[in-house]
Image (cartoon, rainbow, N blue to C red):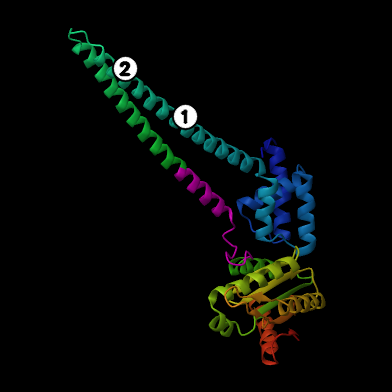
Amino acid sequence: MKFAENNNQAAEYLRQAVPLMVKHNIPPNPLNYALWYTYVSDRVPELNVQLDKTLTTYGTCPTMLSEQLFREHMIKDEIQGAEDIQANLIGLINNLHEHAGDVAKESASFSDVLEDSLDSLKKSEDGETSLPVESVIAALSTHTKKMSETTRLFQDRMDEAQAEIQSLKEELNKSRQDARVDPLTNLFNRRTFDAELEMLTAGNQSITSSFVLVDVDHFKRFNDTYGHLMGDKVLQYVGKLLKDSCPEPMIPVRYGGEEFAVLMPGSTQETASKLAEDIRAKIQAIRIKQKKSGEVISSITASFGVSQLVPGETPEKLIERTDQALYQAKESGRNRVIVSS
């Protein structure tokens, strides 16, 4: 995105953006400066709509959403351009690879023709020495063979280069996977949870928000009985259930091990409790069939702790209260939802 404002206009936009950032507790980093500078300039209406919705929900703009909005509205064209360049580069390498193959084939064919010609000349000797001609042809044949070998080596190097570029492409795609995502469940990880909870508790706490902790019951025993691969499959099932059941602005995360969490900005404790009960029932309904034995595993349950953010409460206190509710759920028989008092 290009900024065409003159010095006076740019300074005015900055004077408007900074107080907004302070008011809504937006971290003063370059990304956020650009985002809020664009917001006050009203040059990207869709960005303003999204930021307004975010402020209504959170009272601030969480880091995760700031980065997402920046990518979608500020550098989308640049990202697309980089991807186009990369695609063109790969296309060029592919073309070079094909061309090198054609050259190798032509060189090999030319070598065969020269060798056949040399044999013919030998057979048509009439008694006069033709050594100079043979020498020339032999030299040409030798040179052609060398050219063919050189081209073959070039093709081999191009194969290696193409393989390396493909590897780099895969690495690039992999790096685009948010470093804050848990690779097993594809949910956000604890790092994201900590950052978003910090933003949530530091924001406008007049907006009701809730928090849910989830713990898969007897998970260690399950792993010991059925193996870690089956255990991973259970975690993936639970992760998918959470992702499907928690639309934005809810943030489901893998909290650690067999524990999950859901941040629910804008949701009451009652709403959070109903959601937890719905997810609990869905987890209890999970059926996994073992391929080798054909046994159907139907003993998967989870316990839930639910709490609502109290104005002025720290992240540590909120987690402690919710964890206590989760502990009560497990102590009172598991496979149930307990709301923090």
The residue closer to the viewer here, 10 or 242, is: 242
Q: In this view, does 53 lie above or below 271?
A: above
Q: Can the viewer see residue 204 in this picture?
A: no
Measured as percent of width and height from the top left, residue 6 is found at 69, 35
Within 10 Å of disc 2 (Cα), the crowding (few <14, some 14-19, many 20+) is: some
In which quadrant will I find the N terminus? top right
Is residue 184 within the magenta segment?
Answer: yes
Q: In this view, does 172 lie above or below 227?
A: above
Residue corresponding to mark 2: 117
Quarter location, residue 25: bottom right
The kind of residue tagged 1 is His
The kind of residue tagged 2 is Ser
Q: Can the viewer see residue 332 in this picture?
A: yes
The furthest residue to the bottom: 332
Within 10 Å of disc 1 (Cα), the crowding (few <14, some 14-19, many 20+) is: few
Residue corresponding to mark 1: 99
240 left or right of 110 in image: right
Measured as percent of width and height from the top left, residue 187 is found at 64, 65
The residue closer to the viewer here, 340 or 156, is: 156
Measured as percent of width and height from the top left, residue 189 is found at 60, 67
207 left or right of 181 in image: right
Is residue 44 within the magenta segment?
Answer: no
